[in-house]
Image (tube, rainbow, N blue to C red):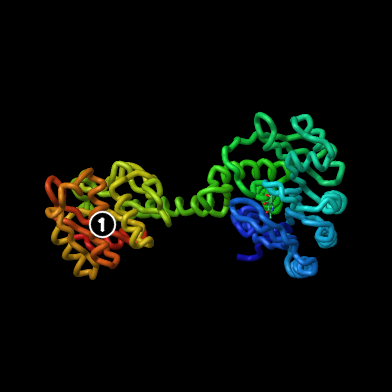
Amino acid sequence: MGKMKSILTIAGYDPSSGAGITGDMDTFFSLGLHGLSAPTCTVIQGPQGVEKVYSTPLKYFREILNTIGKGASLQGVKIGVACDEPYIRETAAFLKNKKGIPVVIDTVFAAKNGTQLITEAGISALTKLLFPMATVVTPNLAEASRLCGKAIKTMSGMKEAARSLIKLGPKAVVIKGGHLKGSPIDIFYDGKEFLSWEKKRIDREVHGTGCAFSSLVASFLVLGYALKDAFFTAEEQMEEVLKASYRIDKLGYFYMSAGIMKSAQADRWQVIHGLREAKERLLTLNPVELIPEVQMNVGYAIEGAAGTEDVAAFPGRIGKHQGKIQIKAGPLFDASSHVALMILTYMRYYPRIRACANVRYDEAIVRKAKTAKMDAVFYDRMKESASTKGTEGRGLDIIVERVLKKAKRPLDIIYDKGGLGKEPMIRLFAKNPGELIQKMEMIRP
Ligand code: PXL
């Protein structure tokens, strides 16, 4: 793999993984950067907010910086909660030996509930010692107001603040206007031009947004983006991650994670990719003998699927025409309720088994499966009570449920010989579509 780019966050430790170091790591790793950290303090908190703050013994903090400074070649630094003057002095000394790499300072002064996260002496040391070394500083309206000594409430006030903050030494200033009346707008100023980004207002309190934004800016700078591009790209990415924010308890703040968001996106791609490969294999192998009257479908669910929206299949199903397998469209998510419900039911018992296809019933096919040592269990639909027949899709997952519950082991095949007005059917299960197709080849008459 070669050498990985590394970025250091000097910030507070949030045990709930929303803000600070734990949040910053999530951002760094999600963008393919290796994250290192030096905690200035531990902020005791959960989704209900900050309770207490304990600063890191200065000696520990110094030793962490010394060791990291000697051992790792860093490509960027992000600073969050700076805590107090001594930590800022150590940080400034550390940065003196790291000239030329981007330094993003998120001026964190207080938590949402008002708990102070930096001392007055700290604020003054931050601006005097660290602002001149900064590539970007990212105050919100309250922090910019505190730094400029007057309340900022309007866009022209924000611009005036940016002009005065740039004089303190950073190459660029981003003022976050999330609490502006009317549209929330962030502005960027590099001493030459103003840029702005109008944000979408969201109706939830998300913890750690400031940390995530500044980590994104720092990460994009490490990745080689120009200042303006880092600003815009961080804003775009924030919008995405905020949309995917979630709660970790019934009440309290929402959390956000670029890592979780990206892993979900990657999972969905992997599922689509698996089904595309299956589609190619099916077209090549052309197992028309396995297509039932009602046609076939092949479904594949993401890890931890919660509903049919997490299961992909082929819309309009897989049929045959003039001796050839015909796949009309897809794969797509939420494209089949039958196969999807069977997979979701199966996954409640065996979460690793995420693929299913329905196959034409034939005694010879079941015999071949058994000869190949597949575990096939018969379900008698004739014995079904009227109450479970219900709608088509529902019946099938109840079959899966009943058979697995009784079998107490994962099965390759659950089949039935039909019922009133129901075509007999074989349901084939596997970990993934590749394994599913292998099984189809094994049972093909
Ligand atoms: O969101 C500001 C912030 C930053 N860093 C840490 C925090 C908080 C707020 O709680 O705990 C460590």
Residue at position x 63%, y 51% in the image: 49
Q: Quadrant of residue 76?
A: bottom right
The residue tagged with tag 1: helix, strand or loop?
A: helix
Tell me: 133 left or right of 403: right
Q: How many marks?
A: 1
**Residue 334 placement (x, y as % from top left):** 37, 44
Front residue of 168 and 333: 168
Tell me: 21 left or right of 352: right
Front residue of 427 and 11: 11
Res 200 seen here = yes
Asked if residue 292 is positioned above or below residue 158 in the image, the reply reads: below
User: Quick one: which residue is furthest to the front in this view?
Assistant: 51
Quadrant assignment for the C terminus: bottom left
Asked if residue 174 is positioned above or below residue 285 in the image, the reply reads: above
**Residue 321 placement (x, y as % from top left):** 22, 44
Q: Counting other residues with Cα less than 10 Å from the Cα at mark 1, is it few (<14), some (14-19), or many (20 or more)?
A: many
**Residue 129 placement (x, y as % from top left):** 86, 53
Q: Quadrant of residue 380?
A: bottom left
Residue at position x 80%, y 38% in the image: 162
Q: Quadrant of residue 53?
A: bottom right
Residue at position x 53%, y 53% in the image: 260
Kindly tell me whether mark 1's CB lies below 8 Å from ligand 1.
Answer: no
**Residue 276 placement (x, y as % from top left):** 38, 51
Residue at position x 57%, y 47% in the image: 254
Front residue of 95 and 175: 175
Res 433 seen here = no
Quadrant assignment for the N terminus: bottom right
Name the residue type under label 1. Val
Front residue of 210 and 3: 210
Q: Name the residue tied to disc 1.
A: 400
